Amino acid sequence: MINNLNILPIYEIELQGKPFFDKQRSIAYCQQYEIYTEMQQILPFQIQLEGLNHQVAGVTLYKSNGDVVIQNILQYMESAGLVIEQDASGLNDILVFRSIAPMALNLIEGYYYIDFEVQQNQTNPKRYNSEIFHMMPNLDNFLKLEYFANDEIEYPFGTINFAYPFKFRMYINTDIGRPDYKTTNEELVRDGITFYRKQLSQKVFKFAFIAPEYICDALRLAPLCENKKLTDQYGNEYYLKTMKLDVSFDSGYFAKVKCEFSIDDVIKRTPQRYPQESYEDFNNDYNNDYAI
C-alpha cells in the first residue's frame, strides 16, 4: 500500500522483502525524483494504521545504495516528534512524525531512506520504507512550502491529523516568476453610463516545477488547508490566501506543475454612488466669485 498524501511517501512492503521506491515502476525508467530535506532531519509524514495499540519496533537509516548507516534511530525520531495517536473515531491509530527539530545523527550530505517495523500488541508486524530523500546542508535557494489545516482532513483510507505542531513541508527547486494583475469590477450600466459599485485589484503570483505523480497527489491537500506559507530564497514570507495547481503530464514521467497563489494584498475601492461636481477658482483671485 502506498500512502500518497505525504511529500515523503511511505510504502508498506513484505517483512522479508526488498524496499520499494517509485523509480522501480516500469513507467519511471529508473528516474529518481529529488526530495530535499535539511541536514539531520526527515520530512514530516503520517501513516494510517488499522486498529489500536500499535508500537514502532525500530527504525533503520540506510544509504540509497542499501548500506546501513545507523541500525536504530527510533529514539532520535521520538525526540523529533514521532508519536502514535488515535484518529477522531477512536478506532484506529495514526503514526505521526512531526519533524520539529534536527536529530543528533551527525550525518553528511547524501541520499538516504528509512526502514521500520510497526507492531500491534507486540504481534502482527508490518514493515515500511520511505522514499529516498536528499539531505542538503543549504536549502536557501529553494522555495519552502508549509501547510496545515485547522482540523482533521478525511480521505477514503483514513484521516490526516493536523494536531499541533504537525505541518507538511516541501522544498522546491524553483523561483517565483512574474505575476499577473487582475481587476474585478462590480458595475451597473444605466442610460449608457457605467456606475462602479466595487472595484478590486489583486496581484497573482506564479511559479512552476516538475514533480512525479506521488508529489502531485500529496499537494492536493495544500489548497484545502487554511494555513499555507511560502518562503523564497530572499527570506520573504508569503501567507497564501488562495492556491491553485495545474498539473499536466506530457511525454515524460514527471509532470509539469504550475502554481498560482494570492496573498492578503487586495486593493478595494467603493466609489461614491453619486459623483459630486467640483468647482474651481477660474481666475485664481482666491475668493468665492466662482460660486456666484
Image (cartoon, grey):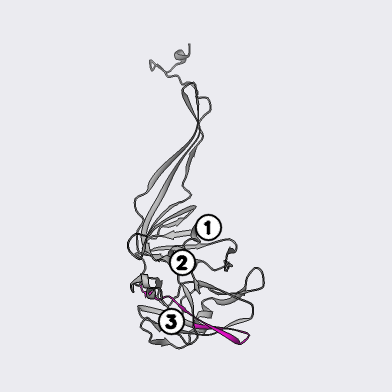
Residue bearing the label numbered 2: 169
> Which residue lies at the image location 49% right of the left edge and 39% below the top edge?
268
Residue at image position (39%, 79%) is: 112
Crowdedness of circle 3 by 10 Å Cα count: few (<14), some, many (20+)? some
Tell me how far mark 1 sits from mark 2, CA to CA: 15 Å
Residue 22: mark: none
Q: Which mark is residue 19?
A: 3
Q: Is residue 233 visible?
A: no
Marks 1 and 2: which is nearer the front? 1
Q: Kindly state the secondary structure of the residue where label 3 is placed.
A: loop
Residue bounds of the magenta highlight: 116-137
Q: In the orientation shown, which residue stands out farthest toward the right?
A: 90
Is the residue under label 1 in contact with that under label 3 (CB below 8 Å)? no
User: In the rendered image, which residue does mark 1 sit on?
Assistant: 224
Judge depth for marks 3 and 1 and give the one in front.
3
Residue 74, image x, y percentages: 51, 84
